[in-house]
């Protein structure tokens, strides 16, 4: 690990190939996004809270809160069991393909979030307002 002079915000730091690739991604994407309103439109309160995340090779998500009866326990892909043998927390997880693992970290986070939501829809998630927290 090299030491750099970071005494000022104007200090220069050499960037590796990965950082340059990520910056190119954002330089190409940002002009396509267009303007966004400063005020958020009204949205109803979330009834289900889900957290998701992705690493270099895998994705996963967990339901943080949901009303009883939202999920079909038999349809959940993973079932960490509580002391009574019942499903304690709905989870979704998987591994990226080699091609997907080679994509940017932002792409993997968004793809992971999509796969988490798809997994929970397959497990019975319907007619709910979801607050999805992506790291």
Image: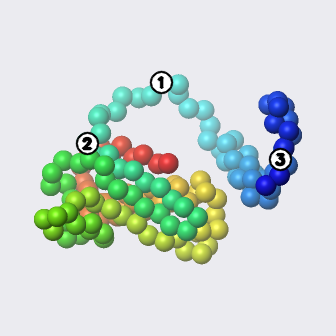
Asked if marks 3 and 1 touch (Cβ < 8 Å), the reply is no
Nearest the eye: 56 or 4: 4
Name the residue: 30% across, 70% down.
Answer: 77
Q: Residues within 10 Å of mark 3 (few under 14, many from 20)?
A: few
Judge whether 54 appears above or below 10 on screen: below
Pointer 2 local density, CA inside 10 Å: few below 14, some 14–19, many at least 20: few
Q: Quadrant of residue 80?
A: bottom left
Q: Nearer the viewer, mark 3 or mark 1?
A: 3
Could you say which is closer to the camera, residue 68 or residue 43?
A: 68
Query: Residue beneath label 1, please?
Result: 39
Task: Give me the residue at 58% from left, 64% from top.
Answer: 56
- Gap between marks 2 and 3 measured at Cα: 48 Å
Q: Nearer the viewer, mark 2 or mark 3?
A: 3
User: Which residue appears at 13% of the width and 65% of the height?
Assistant: 84
Report the quarter where the N terminus lies: bottom right
Q: Residue furthest top?
A: 39
Query: Given contact means CB atoms under 8 Å apart, are the residues at marks 2 and 3 in contact?
Result: no
The secondary structure type at the circle numbered 1 is: loop
Dot 2: element = loop
Q: Which residue is mark 3?
A: 3
Residue 119: image x %, image y %? Answer: 35, 64
The front one of 119 and 91 is: 91
Q: Is residue 71 visible?
A: yes
Where does label 2 land, which residue?
47
Left or right, 82 with reference to 91: left
């Amino acid at each position: 690990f090299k030491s750099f002079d970071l005494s000022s915000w104007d200090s220069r730091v050499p960037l590796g190939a990965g950082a340059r690739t990520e910056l190119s991604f954002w330089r190409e994407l940002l002009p396509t996004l267009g303007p966004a309103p400063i005020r958020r439109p009204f949205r109803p309160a979330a009834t289900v809270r889900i957290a998701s995340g992705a690493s270099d090779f895998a994705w996963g998500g967990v339901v943080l809160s949901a009303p009883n009866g939202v999920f079909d326990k038999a349809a959940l892909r993973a079932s960490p069991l509580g002391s009574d043998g019942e499903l304690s927390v709905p989870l979704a997880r998987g591994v990226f393909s080699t091609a997907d693992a080679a994509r940017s970290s932002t792409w993997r986070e968004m793809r992971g979030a999509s796969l988490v939501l798809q997994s929970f829809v397959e497990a019975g998630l319907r007619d709910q307002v979801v607050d999805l927290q992506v790291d």
